[in-house]
């Protein structure tokens, strides 16, 4: 999967106000370019502000919404009169929200912003509407995205139940950056082969990095041990790709440094974007659940350090399809989960340490 900055980067979809369509999307902010304010990343204040701004949007309060825009957003959106006319067209076509289907919050991986994703039914639309707001630390709208988002069509794996008893491939509390089956949780929801991909990072005080976030070692997840999620046999490794500078993506090998583990029953764990030269296992080696296999990195098609995980149904031939990954015996946002699929916005950790390897029995003593 290409780990996209899609939910961190948005395009205004007002008919007359489209921008960023001819090339790479603009960043919500660059690392270190936002000063502190009254709405720290992932704070209660930032979350409340996000919901307030959404209220302006769904109720057609264009003047209040425009006033909340950052200077850059105002430049690309035209003047207040132009914006009001475009906003009125959207309100006329969609009506008002009748039901919130889901929401989540996440930090921008490359800037000091809070991302609010909301999935809603509106009165005049058949399909749900996906809205993403990016709020900076001053409480201003750094970016806005909204569009109809029909539920993903079913595929043959939608009701799949894992045979392998999976544990999270890390120790401690990690944040689910991508996980779930709808577009507001998972930008790969419409991509059949990558539909059930998961991505994780580590947050402290709501932020994925310290300092200005321009160096990999400023990210809290970088260099953290990556563990085998279950017993199996290593069938492929790659350890040679350099880690990217945050914000710069390598396109040659999208998955970067990786470890692929066969668990049997046509279930394989793929651990991606690992740190260069951190892989501790070899092809053909048998591993146990909880055994370190590498370290979290920023290699491949990755804009910032994070861990991507896929459970898939082949080692490469035929083309692998991701499978729903059901993890056992874990804690999500403080609540115990016997078996489940992690969702974007949750903090998760294994409920108990991995079982210690059983030492081999000593050979019987020779009779004299």
Image (cartoon, rainbow, N blue to C red):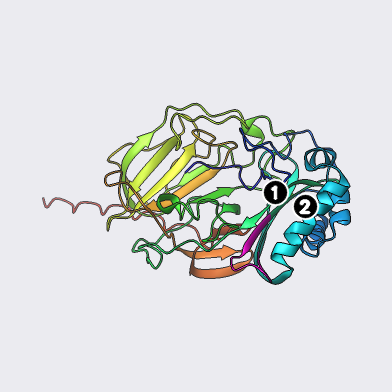
Q: Where residue 15 appears, x then y in whole percent?
A: 70, 48
Query: Where 25 sits versus 64, above or below?
Result: above
Task: Kindly identify which numbered label has been placed on residue 86.
Answer: 2
Answer yes or no: is residue 38 visible: no
Q: Quadrant of residue 128?
A: bottom right
Q: Check disc 1 and report its element: helix, strand or loop.
A: loop
Q: Quadrant of residue 304?
A: top right
Residue 330 lies in the magenta stretch: no
The residue positioned 34% from the left and 47% from the top of the image is: 261
Q: Where residue 209 appears, x then y in whole percent?
A: 69, 40
Answer yes or no: is residue 351 visible: yes
* Number of on-image labels: 2
Dot 2 alpha-carbon crowd within 10 angstroms: few under 14, some 14 to 19, many 20 or more? some
The residue positioned 51% from the left and 29% from the top of the image is: 250
The residue positioned 57% from the left and 64% from the top of the image is: 331
Apparent side of residue 62 relative to residue 171 in the rendered image (left or right):
right
Q: Quadrant of residue 347?
A: bottom right
Q: Residue furthest left?
A: 368
Distance Cα–Cα, label 1 vs label 2: 7 Å
Q: Are marks 1 and 2 in contact (CB under 8 Å)?
A: yes
Apparent side of residue 252 relative to residue 58 in the rendered image (left or right):
left
Residue 121 lies in the magenta stretch: yes
Dot 1 alpha-carbon crowd within 10 angstroms: few under 14, some 14 to 19, many 20 or more? few
Residue linked to disc 1: 15
Q: Where residue 55 appears, x then y in whole percent?
A: 80, 63
Mark closer to the chain start, 1 or 2: 1
Magenta-drawn segment:
120-131
Q: Check disc 2 and report its element: helix, strand or loop.
A: helix
Task: Report the front residue among 204 and 363.
Answer: 204
């Amino acid at each position: 999967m290409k780990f996209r900055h899609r939910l961190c980067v948005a395009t205004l979809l007002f008919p007359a106000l489209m921008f960023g369509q001819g090339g790479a999307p603009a960043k919500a902010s660059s690392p270190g370019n936002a000063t502190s304010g009254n709405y720290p990343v992932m704070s209660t204040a930032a979350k409340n502000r996000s919901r307030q701004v959404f209220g302006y949007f769904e109720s057609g309060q264009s003047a209040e919404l425009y006033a909340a825009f950052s200077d850059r957003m105002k430049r690309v959106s035209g003047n207040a009169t132009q914006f009001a006319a475009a906003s009125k067209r959207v309100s006329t076509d969609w009506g008002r929200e009748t039901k919130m289907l889901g929401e989540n919050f996440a930090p921008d991986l490359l800037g000091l912003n809070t991302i609010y994703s909301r999935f809603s039914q509106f009165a005049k639309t058949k399909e749900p509407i996906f809205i993403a707001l990016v709020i900076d630390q001053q409480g201003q709208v750094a970016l806005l995205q909204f569009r109809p988002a029909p539920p993903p069509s079913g595929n043959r794996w939608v009701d799949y139940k894992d045979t392998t008893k999976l544990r999270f491939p890390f120790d401690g509390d990690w944040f689910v950056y991508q996980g779930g089956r709808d577009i507001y949780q998972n930008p790969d929801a419409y991509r059949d082969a990558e539909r059930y991909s998961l991505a994780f990072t580590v947050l402290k005080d709501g932020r994925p990095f310290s300092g200005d976030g321009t160096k990999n070692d400023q990210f809290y997840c970088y260099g953290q041990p990556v563990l085998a999620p279950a017993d199996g046999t290593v069938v492929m490794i790659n350890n040679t790709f350099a880690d990217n500078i945050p914000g710069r993506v390598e396109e040659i090998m999208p998955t970067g440094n990786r470890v692929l583990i066969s668990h049997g029953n046509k279930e394989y764990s793929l651990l991606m974007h690992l740190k260069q030269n951190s892989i501790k296992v070899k092809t053909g080696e048998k591993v146990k659940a909880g055994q370190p296999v590498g370290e979290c990195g920023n290699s491949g098609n990755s804009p910032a350090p994070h861990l991507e995980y896929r459970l898939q149904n082949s080692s490469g031939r035929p083309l692998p399809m991701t499978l729903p990954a059901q993890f056992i015996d874990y804690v999500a946002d403080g609540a115990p989960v016997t078996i489940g699929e992690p969702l974007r916005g949750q903090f998760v950790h294994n409920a108990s340490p991995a079982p210690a390897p059983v030492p081999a029995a000593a050979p019987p003593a020779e009779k004299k």
